[in-house]
Amino acid sequence: MLKLEKPVRLFVADIDGCLSGGSTTQYSVEMIEKLQHANRASRTDPAVPAVTFCTGRPQPYVECLIQATHGYKSALCEGGALFFDPVNHLVHTHPSFGPREQKLLSELRAMVARELVNDQVMFEPGKVTHITLILAPPLRPPDLIGKAEEIAGRFGETFMVEQTRVCVHILFRHLHKGTGIEWLSEHTGIGPSEMAGIGDAGPDIPFLKMMGVACAPANAHADVKAVADFVSERPDAQAAAEFLDHIIAANRALGVSAAR
């Protein structure tokens, strides 16, 4: 059984690879219902943490998922650089994303538009703080990564390039999910040590290292599993459901109950 040093108040989940298999796959009804139940129960039972997200997805996508899961805690979008408050319906960019970053991103976007974008390579709509390129088959991310890195390199160490199985991201090096979690903690009053996180890929490592307890699903990259406190034998959504159950049980083992 999972053991905690202090109760977990907030369950922070990456989305693709953790709550679903990612783009081109579907969410399970069981997962959506489980997150709905957790969010409802968390309002009256302190042993059940509320659920929120820390994802590279844009804000409209995250807002939809929060609504579907009855969420009420603020979430991190665009790799921690964008903050969405579902209660007050407010969207904020990270304090470290200022006029300088806007100017640099605009210059980068213009270069990418001239040198990479075509009928098979397009910008993902809705991204505010970084660039995501979507590729049409037969192109794959490795086909673009070299040129994307060359363009990003014109800005020195300002940007970094990452690839998934379906897209390429160009992001500010100083803005990541770890800085996002610090920001989320300031807004919610919940310390990272009172959070539990699940992630599957390299961009999740900075935030997983900050969690009170961290999980990696079976499909996670090896470097993610290396920093996780709990590595599930189950994939994506099944691992998230298992981890959430373990957290609730561990909270109760600490004496946390619905009694107030």
Image (tube, grey):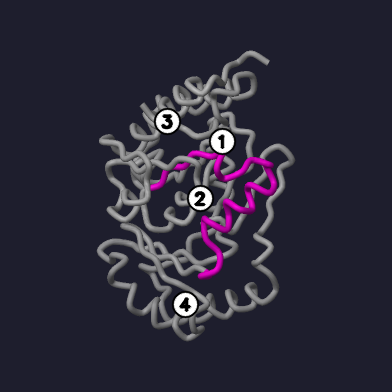
Q: Which residue is mark 1?
A: 10
* In this picture, residue 108 sits left or right of residue 87: left
| Camera-nearest residue between 116 and 170 | 170
Specify start and end residues of the magenta stretch as a single range: 172-199
Give how far apart the Cα atoms at labels 4 and 1 are.
38 Å
Q: Check whether the beta carbons of the residues at disc 2 and disc 1 lie within 8 A of each other.
A: no
For the residues carrying marks 2 and 1, which lies nearer the camera in this image? 2
Mark number, residue 112: 4
| Residue type at tag 1 | Leu
The quarter of the rendered structure image containing the C terminus is top right
34 above or below 55?
Answer: above
Q: Residue at x 53, y 66 (%)?
A: 130
Q: Dot 3: few (<14), some (14–19), or many (≥20) neighbours within 10 Å?
A: some
Q: Check whether the beta carbons of the residues at disc 1 and disc 3 lie within 8 A of each other.
A: no
Q: Residue at x 49, y 39 (%)?
A: 196
Give how far apart the Cα atoms at labels 2 and 3 are.
17 Å
